[in-house]
Image (spheres, rainbow, N blue to C red):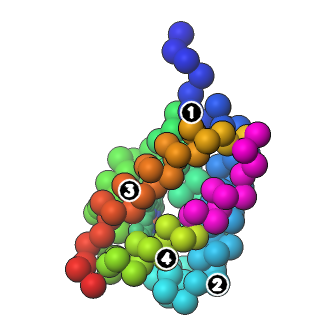
């Protein structure tokens, strides 16, 4: 039996639901990001990102059941992502993470989560501007 997953350690589904809901609340009001999202309804995109993050951190594998291999570089190709878009994405995500109380997300887990999100956002830059 392995140690408790990171997913479980930070409060499981409810924590991811809250982070990603806050993220999309910010995206909806962000003039850089909002135009990038093709669908009028951000609900389906919210669900995909939530499922992906849950799976990445050891939660349910619903993302891959529904979407197959993540292939995030490829799936982001349709969108021009330069440093400005990366920064906007991270700004919204940091707000979402900041809304989770320290009792739920302690410093060590918070640091690991933010480090991952920064690394992942950098890795999806596909344009120099
Ligand atoms: C999808 C933008 C970074 C994970 C999308 C979509 C957009 C977008 C416009 C399409 C919405 C949809 O239909 O789902 C961006 C921008 C980023 C960024 C501007 C800035 C760097 C990230 C990062 C992750 C991520 C860092 C993961 C940690 C996803 C996932 C999907 C997605 C899982 C849905 C893929 C699918 O199954 O179709 N992103 N994204 N994105 N993004 Fe990002």
Q: Residue at x 67, y 42 (%)?
A: 105
Residue 120 image position (x, y, % from top left)? 38, 56
Task: Give the CA separation, mark 3 to mark 2.
Answer: 22 Å
Task: Give the CA separation, mark 1 to mark 3.
Answer: 17 Å
Residue 117 image position (x, y, % from top left)? 46, 55
Q: Residue at x 49, y 76 (%)?
A: 88
Marks 1/3 in contact by CB < 8 Å: the verdict is no
Task: Give the CA separation, mark 2 to mark 1.
Answer: 30 Å
Q: Magenta span has 96?
A: yes
- Mark 4 C-beta to ligand 1 under 8 Å: yes
Residue 16 image position (x, y, % from top left)? 65, 49
100 relative to 67 in the view: left or right = right
Q: Is residue 90 above or below residue 19?
A: below
Task: Give the CA separation, mark 4 to mark 3.
Answer: 14 Å
Label 4 secondary element: helix
- Mark 3 C-beta to ligand 1 under 8 Å: yes
Quadrant (top left/top right/bottom left/bottom right) for the C terminus: bottom left
Residue 55 image position (x, y, % from top left)? 51, 41
Query: Residue 12's image quarter?
Result: top right
Asked if one can make out residue 91 in the rendered structure from this viewpoint, the answer is: yes
Q: For the magenta stretch, what is the residue range? A: 93-103
State the mark number for residue 120: 3
Q: Residues within 10 Å of mark 2 (few under 14, many from 20)?
A: few
Q: Which residue is mark 4?
A: 88
């Amino acid at each position: 039996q392995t140690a408790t997953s990171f997913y479980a350690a930070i409060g499981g589904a409810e924590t991811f639901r809250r982070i990603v809901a806050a993220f999309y609340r910010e995206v909806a009001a962000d003039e850089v990001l909002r135009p990038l999202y093709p669908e009028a309804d951000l609900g389906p995109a919210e669900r995909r990102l939530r499922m992906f993050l849950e799976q990445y951190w050891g939660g349910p594998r619903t993302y891959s059941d529904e979407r197959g291999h993540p292939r995030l570089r490829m799936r982001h190709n349709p969108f021009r992502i330069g440093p400005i878009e990366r920064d906007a994405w991270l700004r919204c995500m940091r707000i979402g993470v900041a809304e989770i109380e320290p009792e739920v997300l302690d410093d060590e887990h918070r640091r690991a989560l933010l480090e991952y999100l920064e690394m992942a956002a950098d890795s999806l830059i596909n344009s120099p501007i």
